[in-house]
Image (tube, grey):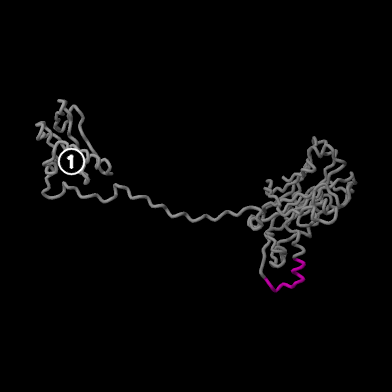
Amino acid sequence: MAIATFHPGITAEILVNGHPAYEYDDPDKTEADILDSDADKYKASVTISKYIKSETNQDFSIKVAVSPPHSNKMGSKTVFNISVDGVPAWISTAARPAVKKQNGVWEDVVCGVKQGKGKGCKLQTFRFVEIKTTDSTDVEAGKIQRLAQRLQKVGLIEITVWRTDYGKKGGDTPGDAKKFLTEKGDDTCVPERALKGGDAKSHGTVLSKPATVKRGDVWRTNRLDGEDYPLVIFKFLYRSEESLKQLQIIPRTPSPSPSPSPIPFPTPASSAPRAPSVAAIPGFDPNSVTSGLTYEQKRALLASLMTENSQGSSASFSGSVEGGSSQGEKRIKTEDGEETHRAKRVRARNGEPLQIDLTGEDEESGEENELFVRQN
């Protein structure tokens, strides 16, 4: 909804298929300080300009409203002059007595052009139509100029709000259906050269077939502030979504960026080649590893084997705690006479378990401390 902040209580909006259209600010709104005449500067200062999205064959209507605080201080009448594509469509009149009856809130929805009097009044509703362009070069310059002039205000819904006297009832309807675009001939299929400056106009407005309606009141009033000083000017420029993107009113959807190359992960240790097991060598005697070693050397060898296997991905250990095991593993006595379990089960690198026992006698001490390795 477009709101006149400098005249709070005066609003206008476009309804597309009965729903309020989303409004985008106009980045190219004319600034008052660059204009020459005082009247033009004033008009620019009271103009509210918005873009809305249009789609082919959608019906639309124009809703205007008066509410407090404007309705509390308004004069005799607040009048909304409505034009579409530069063609007069209707005049909505908010009279002070009618506004007071509705607790200060008044609104009107204009859905088309009315023509005729009494029971012969006909209504033709608004509908968006696509404007197609051709690259034809054989169109005479005069026709190009006429088409360009006609298309100049196509795509614009304009509502000018005035303060007026009470006026007199009666007169002709303000709309002129004959001046609207039609879907025949050159109206909606025009040479690209007729669009000045490459204007991204995509739609115009056509009217439906006439239907009989009640005309409503028509008034003849006088503008209290003169012809150059309206209260508000609302401008709604309607374009297709693609045209709004070309005009950079709405952002384009960014193209998806290519996916980055995956970072290679290190090869798991479990998949690395394994060193051949000594137990797999024909004729190899595991006990020959410990022959000729002292007790301390055997302990160091055992610790080294346990450390190496604990760092491998496929190594595992199993051993029995004090209290024995069901596998007949032996215990030995330490120097202080305690019995301790010296059996360690080591899984070879090829996955086959090796049993390492420290059960022999030390050559010097005479205690049992023989270390031997056997494959289970």
Amino acid at circle 1:
Leu
At 27% from the left edge and 44% from the top edge, which residue is drawn?
A: 312
Crowd rating for badge 1 (residues with CA inside 10 Å; few <14, some 14–19, many 20+):
some
At 70% from the left edge and 68% from the top edge, which residue is drawn?
A: 193
At 69% from the left edge and 46% from the top edge, which residue is drawn?
A: 20
Task: Judge left or right: residue 135 versus residue 356.
Answer: right
Please tell me whether residue 220 belongs to the stretch shown in magenta.
Answer: no
Residue extending farthest top: 337
Q: Nearer the viewer, residue 160 or 327?
A: 327
Q: Nearer the viewer, residue 181 or 347?
A: 347
**What span is in magenta?**
136-147
Above or below, 368 against 281 in this view is above
Quadrant where the N terminus sits is: top right
**Total labels drawn:** 1
Quadrant where the C terminus sits is: top left
Residue 364's spot in the image, x, y percent?
10, 34
Q: Quadrant of residue 305?
A: top left
Identify the residue under disc 1: 354
Please tell me whether residue 140 belongs to the stretch shown in magenta.
Answer: yes
Q: Nearer the viewer, residue 8 or 131?
A: 8
Residue 69's spot in the image, x, y percent?
80, 37
Above or below, 182 against 62 in this view is below
Above or below, 312 against 103 in this view is below
Q: Secondary structure at mark 1?
A: strand
Q: Nearer the viewer, residue 302 or 260?
A: 302
At 74% from the left edge and 69% from the top edge, which residue is drawn?
A: 144
Residue 89's spot in the image, x, y percent?
79, 53
